[in-house]
Image (cartoon, helix red, strand yellow):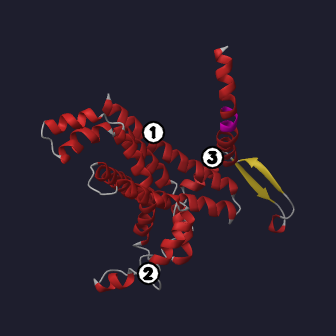
Amino acid sequence: MRKRTAAAFLAPFLLLFAAFFVAPIGYAVVQSLTTVERSGLLGLHGSTTRFAGLSNYGSALSNPDFMGSIGRILLFALIMVPLMVVASTALALVLEAGVSRWPRFFRTAYFLPYGVPGVIASIMWGFLYAPGTSPFTPLLKAVGADADLLGPGPVLWSIMNIVVWQFVGYNMLIVVAQLKSIPQGLYEAARMDGASRWTVAWSIQLPLIRPALVLITVFTIIGSLQLFNEPFVLTPLSSGISSTYTPTITAFNEAFNSNNLSLAAAESIVLALVISVLSFGFLRLVGRERR
């Protein structure tokens, strides 16, 4: 009876999970193994779908633009992950230490950018970055720095700033929730021993919020490698963002501009494999260190 009851409660979730998660992944895998051949002028005489094996994967992996986008997004993640984790943790520790006078106000203020849709945030920052409208341009010119924040060099850092601005508050709240679960008795014992705030943070808080740090690290790895909204929206404003700037933009253009859904599916699967390897590799590394 209990097994039937549990199965009844799980059935809706399992059906939706299979329909909207497992099935699309399976369809993408199948599509990546096929190719569409069109006949006639402009392909107007019909098309046939045939099995292509791993040829789409070979085309994706031999494409220097696609592999360059993989390298670029790995560099982005290499910088973004520690930056996001350190910034989120520092904000959470400062707020929980009682340094700020209005912690609830600052928690809400830091979280508010997460409520702004990524497209809207990118448009807003695009105006702040554009040389003609940017308030930062005069300041950068005054110190002799590159005033074009959307140029080929600085644009990656500009995108990082948008991502940090939008998601650091969300990750901060995850850390704050973990900090709230620490027993107050540990703080009282530390105060009786004369421990400073730095000692409390380093010896008590950081070890006990390890699960939250692991969680936001995995979130940041996945989110960084799936980067799409920010560079896509900034493309008309920047000469440094191409149609193959990130793997997701490359797959998007292959699917909807070049009408090559099979190659786009293969590129998406390659990106998914990279994300899986890095995410599960990090979790395995963390688990091994704990053991």
With respect to residue 129, does 226 lie above or below? Answer: above
Q: Secondary structure at mark 2?
A: loop
Where is residue 142? Give x, y as percent.
30, 86
Q: Nearer the viewer, mark 2 or mark 3?
A: 2
Q: Secondary structure at mark 3?
A: loop
Where is residue 88? Give x, y as percent.
36, 53
Amino acid at circle 1: Phe
Amino acid at circle 3: Leu
Q: CA distance from mark 2 to mark 1?
A: 41 Å
Q: Which residue is mark 3?
A: 54
With respect to residue 24, does 144 lie above or below? Answer: below
Where is residue 73? Give x, y as percent.
46, 58
With respect to residue 204, does 223 lie above or below? Answer: below
Going from N to C along the chain, the mark reached first, 3 or 1, is 3
Going from N to C along the chain, the mark reached first, 2 or 3, is 3
Q: Which residue is mark 2?
A: 134
> In the rendered structure, which segment of residues is drawn in magenta?
14-18
